[in-house]
Amino acid sequence: MFGTIRKHQTWLWAVIITLTVISFVVYFSPYSRMNSSGRRSGVYGSINGDKITDQQYRNASREVDLHSFFRSGGHWLAEDKKRSEQDIEREVYQWLLLTWEQDRLGIHLDEQATADYARQMVRSFERAGVTSPQMFIERVLQPHGLKVDDFERYARHYMGIQELVTTVGLSGQLITPLEARNLYERDHQEIASTAVFFAASNYLASVVVTPQAVSEFYSNRVANYGVPERVVVSYVRFNVTNFLPQAETELSTNLNDIVDSNFQRIGTNAATVFPEAKTPADVKAKIKEQVVRREALALASQKANEFAHKLFDAQPVQASNLDLLARTNGLATGLTAPFDRDQEPKGLDVGPEFTKAAFGLSADDPFGGPIAGQDGVYVIALQNRLPYQIPSLDQIRDRVESDYKLLQALARAQEAARNFYQTLTNGQAQGKTFTNLCAEAKVKPVELPAFSISTRSLPEFEELVSLDQLKQAAFSTQPGKASLPQRTSDGSMILYVKAKLPVEPARMQSDLPNYVNAVRRSRQQEAFDAWFRREAEKGLRDTPLGRPQPPQLGSAAKS
């Protein structure tokens, strides 16, 4: 196939930026990084009885890396820290299953069809400057350990997946003209409505707080006030800013070439990657900043590794060694405030890996790292582990009293809503209008903008009630009637539905073709997702995804 692809070299290489990939919401994430070497040879399992070889797993890992690169506009797996190693492994196995299914169903696209499809999608990218296969190989593939064969295989499998989605999801594309019109009307018919909100804040002043009531409130909810297990760690940070000058010096010879190469690679996606950049010069400045910072982070990692090895080798093993070694090397240490498993330490620009590493420490194994953060690389030592505890009422009395008052105010707001609903029901039965009943009850109705099932936001009201809750109340209530009281985060709401507004025929006629296409795509994806779930349950049961995971290995620095 690569021979055929070369005939279209002026356009095919642009696929790295503009290729639009169908999103498998359940199975593929836009945030991932490569882990092609994380599993030992021979323990990959099998797909529907077909053993997965070491080469197949490595190939799939490279293709998942390319897949992430294409759909993210130029970000490789290793550059994204939001995905865990387990996430990457799951994506690789799912990719293996997808390619296995292509073979099972006989989906094999010829070379010309693949090349023609890519050309249609990327024709406009010729202006980005990636004009030859050699340029793509040297600037994109080789720096990431990839070869032409990896790209060719990915392109073929990617196209096969699109065909697989179309084939499996065919039933989802069936929709009659009458059904389309009915669906459009259902999704776009707007509701005219008025709401009455009963806010808890309006009832706080009427709540009487007594010591006995607060004590009983605390006793009944004592578990809610438990403080989870926390840790305190000391750390040495190898601040990335300290390495920026050295990074720029070491990159100086090739820095401009690297910036130009990345600028060409980003191409027409520059506005998406760097929305704050207004000119090409601004984009290049941003690229330069990232390249230098990444090199500085690598230099910081080297120093952190050297420090960590000395720390782990020091005897006897004790947490105080971190401070001693830091002073010996002229480095500053820091101490975190206590933080729990769901937190990141205040004042540090780090991610969940820092917290995970901190909670993996013990008195016998007190050191962790190096751990990369946004502002540098950390080596840490456990200083204290604070067990789960329940504070006494006296320690948190102000908080408990505040919670008690709020809960009582919420209850009063909801009671007021129930009483007003009863007033509405009785009053309307006597022929009174909603407006007059609101005036008699001295409640203030709020006119809402017209909205439909397809409405995506009502920003001025979503702090008071969720849009989904609003839709549920509106479309389950007959025009001319009021909804049952709806509990909200701040009290309660009653929605009065004035009318269902007619759909404009001209607008429906104009929107219908695109709407039908969107419905077909959505149903096709739903049909494919349902099919793939079933296939994954069977096909991946004999892989690590279907078996309990082994314990994680320790950090490389400790080995």
Image (spheres, rainbow, N blue to C red):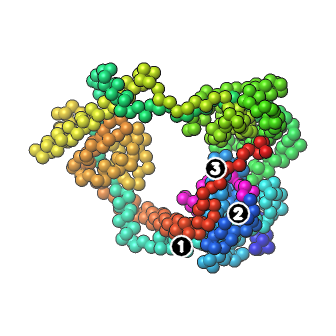
Identity, as a three-letter code, of the amino acid under mark 3: Arg
The residue positioned 85% from the left and 41% from the top of the image is 251
Residue ranking furthest to the bottom: 106
> Residue 330: percent from the left, percent from the top?
82, 24
The residue positioned 66% from the left and 57% from the top of the image is 89
Nearest-to-viewer mark from 1 and 3: 3
Looking at the rendered structure, the number of numbered marks drawn on it comes to 3
| Residue in front for this viewpoint, 424 or 353 | 353
Q: Is residue 309 above or below residue 505?
A: above
The residue positioned 78% from the left and 71% from the top of the image is 2
Q: Earlier in the sequence, mark 3 or mark 2?
A: 2
Q: Is residue 349 above or below residue 39?
A: above
Nearest-to-viewer mark from 3 and 2: 2
Label 2 environment density (alpha carbons within 10 Å; few <14, some 14–19, many ≥20): few
Q: Residue under label 3, please give it.
A: 83
Q: Quadrant of residue 325?
A: top right
> Residue 168: percent from the left, percent from the top?
53, 73
Residue ranking furthest to the left: 430
Nearest-to-viewer mark from 1 and 2: 2
Q: Which mark is residue 43?
A: 2
Report the side of 29 relative to 280 (left or right).
left
Q: Earlier in the sequence, mark 1 or mark 2?
A: 2
